[in-house]
Amino acid sequence: MRKIRVGILGATGTVGQRFLQLLEQHPQFAVTALAASDRSQGKPYAAACAWRLPGAVPDAVRGLVVQAPEPPLDCDVVFSSLPSDIAGPVETRFARAGYRVVTNSSPHRMDDAVPLLIPEVNPDHLALLDACKGTGGGFIVANPNCSTVMIALALAPLAARFGVEAVVATTLQALSGAGYPGVASLDITDNVVPFIAEEEEKIERETRKILGSLRPGAAHSRARRARSPPAAARPRRRGRHVHQCGPDRPRWSPGAPLRRAEPQHDPRGRRSGDPQRGAVAGAGVPAPGRLTPGVCV
């Protein structure tokens, strides 16, 4: 079986390196193109990249010459780990040139025509890509913020079965989340950085979109902000985040009997008996997110 050819944007960064590590000897994907910043272009990958992950640079990509992050590239699918300040327009150009773009960067996550995807939670949101069928086949699919993924996975079954009106969430995000070179040593030694800029807002709005419903003709809901936004802090830990979340002010009282929740998977995130209302989600957000199939990027 012919493997899908993959290009990596931002290939020399730590996330790009992780892409390459995960794709090494993959049964379905083969890395055929690498792209990065000006200082790396024109060099073999092994010479251009300061490898920072455990193990060695994958043999299959050591000799690949690093190119500019612009179309055309010799690949079928583009995985993007570009910095957020440049990712938006570059990814748009690839999509308009007919490439399938899967991005780990944030600029397109809240675009109406871009699925913000957790396959186990909202695979039905891929229907947003139907609008791209007549535009050359290019599209963008976004990966959520790392903390959003874990919070949405925990909330999805509760939201689908019972509905969630408010959430209390705390995230302790490891140093790896800040990228390289990361947090200054004098800031983190014997310390916990109590605030991560823009992180709380990302968790709130992305969770709403992921757990929202997909309805033709409906506008993407802009529900009011959380009463108590999620907390995000940076502890002195190299890898692996820690998340704690749960519904706030549940609908049952301590003295009331609890009934068993039978497993019921509805990929649209709707509650049984209430077909008009999507699952309510987010950090303290009382209204559902709604997605509109829109114009392809």
Image (tube, rainbow, N blue to C red):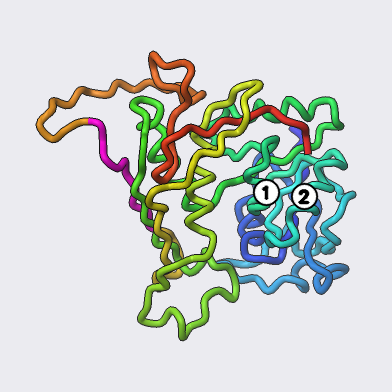
Which residue lies at the image location 42% right of the left edge and 73% below the top edge? 193
Judging depth in this view, the residue of 73 and 124 nearest the camera is 124
Q: What distance separates the C-alpha of mark 1 from that of mark 2?
A: 8 Å
Q: Amino acid at mark 2?
A: Glu
Q: Main secondary structure of the magenta part?
A: strand
Do labels 1 and 2 touch, CB within 8 Å? yes
Please state if 75 lies on the left or on the right of 284 as rendered: right
Count residues near mark 1 (Cα–Cα under 10 Å), then give few for <14, some for 14-19, many for 20+: many
Residue wearing tag 1: 103
In this image, 221 relative to 165: left or right? right
Residue extending furthest top?
273
The quarter of the image holding the C terminus is: top right
Task: Give percent across and percent down for residue 67.
Answer: 85, 61
Tell me where residue 175 appears, x and y as whole percent.
48, 69
239 horizontally vs 73: left or right? left
Q: Secondary structure at mark 2?
A: helix
- Assess whether residue 244 is covered by the magenta stretch: yes
- Residue 154, disc: none
Amino acid beneath label 1: Thr
Q: Quadrant of the N terminus?
A: top right
Residue ID for mark 2? 91
Q: As displayed, is residue 240 above or below residue 249?
A: below
